[in-house]
């Protein structure tokens, strides 16, 4: 087993204990980050480091858990280490940040200092078209360091090892009930189940790519974003956030305009959850709120 896989395994074992110890020190005050222009995506590491992709400057912005600016890196272009049209980010640990670059058909991996450490491009690795992915729409990394991405060109999910070998493909035209129609976002929970936002529903698969279920509710229209929260999901549309079970039963509904701190949030775009905090992204602001202030 390679060192990075060992590190992911160690992180998965130790993180619950580290998280428990850090809760007594955790800042429970809201986190507010202003002075952002045309932000699109947000990712938060297990240690609370906040990353924002800002379209205005074609830059990745890095912030501390309390919102202080730490670094900014811009990489627009068509060269090997540059990005042209980012569509998602994830930070599965405190060492790495992954960015999906739609137009360049690649995934860029950064270290803590936002230096490029790896470029994931299927076209460099494989000659078989069946193993190629084009236009990566969304990404996530599981506890074993396996990368999952939405291959928008073929409307399927690709599971890729840390050595950049395609291990599995699923959700394509032959997937039956699990066939994807318009996949937008992929997220993996602590149990390793894969959740894919597909139109106004969420399709769930196991680690082997087997279809498990479809989560949908008639009250969810124009789904904007979602994230995993313990054993449930939090779904956001243009005006509300909904906590729902994996069978689609709604547990709580909150209108964004009624939440103190969020009532002036202009056009919320994205949400993510880490360490008892729910983070909201709008084009010009990040707001992180303690989850227990929203869902009792």
Image: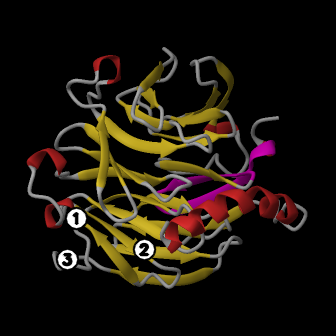
Left or right of 291, for residue 34: left
Task: Decide whether the magenta segment is chiefly helix, strand or loop.
Answer: strand
Q: Residues within 10 Å of mark 1 (few under 14, many from 20)?
A: some
The colour scheme used to paint the residues is secondary structure
Q: Position of residue 30 (x, y in %)?
A: 75, 60
Residue 25 to residue 228: above or below: below
Q: Position of residue 279 (x, y in %)?
A: 62, 54
Per the image, the residue denoted by label 2 is 60
Magenta span: 276-292
Q: Which residue shows up at 32% across the image and 36% down it?
A: 183
Please state which of the two labelled residues, at mark 1 or mark 3, is closer to the viewer.
1
Q: Which residue shows up at 16% across the image and 75% down it?
A: 78
Q: Is residue 93 visible?
A: no
Residue nearer the viewer, 36 or 83? 83
Mark nearer the N terminus (1 vs 2)? 2
Determine whether label 2 and label 3 are within 8 Å by CB. no
Mark nearer the N terminus (2 vs 3)? 2
Residue 264 to residue 38: above or below: above
Q: Is residue 284 visible?
A: yes
């Amino acid at each position: 087993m390679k060192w990075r896989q060992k590190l992911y395994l160690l992180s998965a074992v130790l993180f619950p204990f580290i998280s428990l110890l850090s809760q007594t020190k955790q800042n429970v005050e809201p986190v507010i980050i202003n002075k952002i222009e045309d932000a699109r995506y947000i990712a938060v590491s297990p240690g609370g480091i906040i990353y924002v992709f800002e379209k205005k400057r074609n830059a990745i912005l890095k912030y501390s858990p309390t919102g202080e600016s730490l670094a900014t890196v811009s990489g627009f272009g068509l060269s090997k280490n540059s990005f042209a049209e980012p569509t998602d980010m994830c930070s599965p640990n405190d060492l790495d940040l992954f960015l999906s670059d739609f137009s360049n058909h690649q995934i860029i991996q950064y270290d803590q200092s936002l230096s490029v450490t790896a470029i994931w491009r299927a076209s460099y690795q494989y000659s078989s078209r069946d193993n190629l992915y084009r236009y990566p729409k969304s990404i996530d990394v599981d506890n074993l360091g396996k990368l999952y991405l939405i291959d928008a060109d073929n409307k399927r999910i690709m599971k890729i090892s840390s050595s950049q070998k395609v291990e599995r493909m699923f959700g394509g035209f032959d997937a039956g009930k699990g066939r994807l129609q318009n996949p937008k976002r992929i997220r993996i929970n602590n149990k390793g189940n894969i959740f894919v936002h597909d139109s106004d529903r969420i399709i769930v698969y196991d680690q082997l790519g087997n279809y498990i279920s479809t989560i949908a509710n008639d009250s969810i229209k124009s789904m904007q974003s979602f994230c995993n929260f313990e054993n449930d999901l939090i779904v956001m549309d243009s005006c509300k956030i909904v906590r729902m079970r994996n069978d689609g039963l709604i547990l709580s509904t909150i209108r964004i305009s009624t939440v103190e701190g969020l009532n002036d949030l202009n056009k919320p775009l994205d949400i993510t959850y880490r360490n008892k905090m729910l983070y909201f992204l709008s084009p010009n602001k990040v707001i992180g709120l303690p989850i227990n202030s929203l869902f009792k």
